Image (spheres, rainbow, N blue to C red):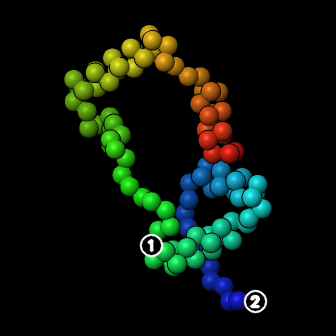
Amino acid sequence: MARTSNIFARVEPEIKEQAEQVLERLGIPMSNAVGMFLRQVVLQRGIPFEMKLPQEAPLVYGALSKRQFDSEIEKGIADIREGKVYTADEVESEMKRSYGI
């Protein structure tokens, strides 16, 4: 058996749990998945997937002026009036469908 080395990483508990669920369905232990990722880093000589900034930066409450904040609130109220609303269950179902959880 090849020698191994330990890696310790801090990860958000929710992300770890979701990843474990996906990997379990694939039949891949977490340690194997991490090893696969690192092998791809070596083979690709970089991160093995595309990384880019979002088209628009997310809104940050503290960075908004009162006018901008009021405008965003008005947009939200307009969406509610137009029926552009989703229940928490609908959002959760979509997340599960999108991420195969």
SS for callout 2 = loop
Image quadrant where one finds the C terminus = top right
The residue depicted at 28 percent of the width and 21 percent of the height is: 71
Q: Indicate left or right for 93 with 54 as reference.
A: right
Q: Is residue 101 visible to us here?
A: yes
Where residue 61 sits in the image (x, y, percent)?
32, 34
Mark 2 burial class by Cα count in 10 Å: few <14, some 14-19, many 20+: few
- Looking at the image, is 61 positioned above or below residue 13? above
Q: Indicate left or right for 25 with 72 as reference.
A: right
Q: Is residue 8 visible to us here?
A: no
Q: Please identify the quarter of the rendering in which residue 55 is found.
A: top left
Where residue 63 sits in the image (x, y, percent)?
26, 38
Q: Nearer the viewer, mark 1 or mark 2?
A: 1
Mark 2 belongs to which amino acid? Met
Where residue 65 sits in the image (x, y, percent)?
22, 30
- In this figure, which residue is indicated by the disc labeled 2? 1
Q: Please identify the quarter of the rendering in which residue 72 is found.
A: top left
Q: Indicate left or right for 32 with 72 as reference.
A: right
Q: Please identify the quarter of the rendering in which residue 78 is found.
A: top left
- In this figure, which residue is indicated by the disc labeled 1? 46
The residue depicted at 74 percent of the width and 64 percent of the height is: 28
